[in-house]
Amino acid sequence: MSYIIQYLAFQSYHFGIISTKCEKKRPDNIIYANVENSYLNNDKHLSELCYKEWINWIIFNPSYETGSEDVVMDLDVKKSRIAELKKSAPLYVLLLPSALLLLCFSYLPLGGIVMAFQDFAPSKGIVGSPWVGFKHFVQFFKSYQFKVTLINTLKLSGYGIVAGFPLPILLAIMCNQMRNGKFKKVFQVITYLPHFISTMVMCGLILIFLSPGTGLFANIFRILGGTGDFPNLMAMPSAFGHIYVWSDIWQHLGWDSIIYLAALAGIDPSYYEAATMDGASTLQKIRYIDLPLIMPTAMILLIMRVGNILGIGFEKVYLLQNVSNIMSSEIISTYVYKIGLQSMQYSLSTAIGLFNTVVNVSILLLVNFISKKLTDSSLF
Amino acid sequence: MVQGSVLQKNTNLMIRKKRFDQDKIVRFFLYAIALCMIIATIYPLWFVIIASFSNPADVVSGQVWLWPKQINIDGYKELFKQSEIWKSYANTILYTAVGTIVGLAVNLPAGYALSRKDLFGRKWINVFYLIPMFVSGGLIPTYFVVRKFGLYNTFWVMIIPFAVSTYNIIVARTFFKENLPDSLWEAAQIDGCGTIRFFLQFVIPLSKAVIAVIALWTAVGIWNQWFNALIYIENENLIPLQLLLRRILITNQSLLGAATGSMAQELRQLSDMMRYASIVISTLPIMCMYPFLQKYFNQGVMLGAVKE
């Protein structure tokens, strides 16, 4: 009997001071739970033991007994940092492999950028090589190659954005208008397919198909009644941009549209129903519902693309360039490769690469800022 | 008044009808364009396949259009005679298998740790993982770091240095956040299960979808990779298939050796056949797998798109 009264008293006590801040998990709550459990299990002895433990706990942790949040918080802050750090330790173990690899192969090379300000020689290392300031940057800016590579990079990249950015949006809208059925499925599978062709094979295909004497395009040209010889497009600097951009669109158009399809799938169908009731045509629905609602997604992707304007793929350009089209196919990244690993001018190459990165990041920040002001969508 | 409303009704119907007709036209064009796109996408790939099985003289003169002519598998025969092809094919399979396992082992735990709200210092750790996405040391510093670690010209250079993929980590993180309820971890914790055990025994079995996505992407990426091999591998015994393709497809080095006179013509045709055949054998594995796995690939794009 006595212990039941004790229990009731103890319960009211408990609700009086603890329930006001029961949001937080407190050790005394857990100890108290033991009391309750043993009571429910009709175990008098254990219940009393647990009760005593709980009282002891309250006595030795006066800050809790006062019931004052502030005191509790103050004491908590320092303890909890260490406690949280300890609690997160297993998570750090899970992060360890990737963090180590990033440190070694991403952050360590980032430190290697100082090579751009030195006359780096592998035999002397970074510590021993003499400092030369901005010599290599000046050398690059003054060189003939600077203007050529910069303009080529901007041209290829800009053309790629202008032609390649709106098309996936159109394709997604088109696909969204199709009735769900076999045709739509087949259409999607087939348009995504070329995305998985490797750059190497893609360039091989381009070279084979465009071959002036025997290629597929030359044959089509003849069938359509073209007279004379099919031009050797790969040897024409003026054609390089078109080849590069349109083959890219052929390869990635379908894949790039997936993300817009996802955005379109997220639109509330009641918009379309309401528009149908009001007698809107398909084109009007596209113009007034689809386009405005996928704009934020489109803006984010545009920022990412423009932010990467100087970073267009090295691989494809490098594989497609030859002596005849080099005038319009030498871009910054291919130049970095040639200067660095073919002519062994390590510092100059690093300087050019650094220039590239700095311009990229600045453009990214700028476009992000403009987009934030104008359309309210931004990366960060 | 009654007449007015009837008139109104009629005009409404007419407008509706007009809209309906317009919609029909739009729909017609839509399917027509879609059909053209299907043909434009599939035909070049189909052409490569039939060309690889046809008589090279017919391919060159434009006789081959829809079906192979005078079936001829000399290209494949000659290709498979080359020991380099077998070696590099085996290398690529090995790189892909090991690289995918390493990629999963590195990126999945990181994704899980970053998805946990109670990770101490989560904000800064996120920044640490995001920075390499936007800035990098560039080609030359990376090259020297890889050499310093003694990875140059070894098997592991294709696997270790570029195993971390921030993008895959984000995909995994988003998946864990959305699909693993907090209560699961809390319940496991109360039962005395630690984080690492929880990850191995609960998270991994519950995340087959995201594991499939990341594994597939990593595998395709490694299968198609050649630039790292170009820079870091000199040893002929270690080169992957894609780098060998470069010799066959791009730089036009014949694996058959030089010849003169009438032999030259035949050899050129044979090497053309080998080019088609090499495209087919290097791309077919992925192309055949793809339609069955498409659902996973698409899922991955959606997961990666979530912004935070």
Image (tube, helix red, strand yellow):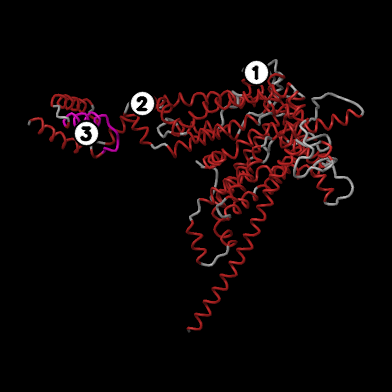
Using the image, tell me which numbered label, if any, was put on residue B193: 2
Q: Residue at x 18, y 26 (%)?
A: A50
Task: Between label 3 and label 1, give the one nearer the viewer.
Answer: 1
Q: Residue A330, located in which quarter of the rendered image? A: top right
Q: Nearer the viewer, residue B63 or B159?
A: B63
As displayed, is residue B152 above or below residue B198?
above
Residue span colored magenta:
A21-39
Give the image location of residue B110, x and y in percent: 49, 29
Indicate the amino acid at tag 3: Thr
Q: Residue at x 59, y 40 (%)?
A: B291
- Please tell me whether residue B124 is drawn above or below residue B149 in the rendered image: below
Q: Chain of mark 2?
A: B
Q: Name the chain under label 3.
A: A
Q: Residues within 10 Å of mark 1 (few under 14, many from 20)?
A: some
> Residue B78: x, y in percent?
77, 26
Viewed as shown, does residue B236 lie left or right of B55?
A: left
Q: Which mark is residue A66?
A: 3
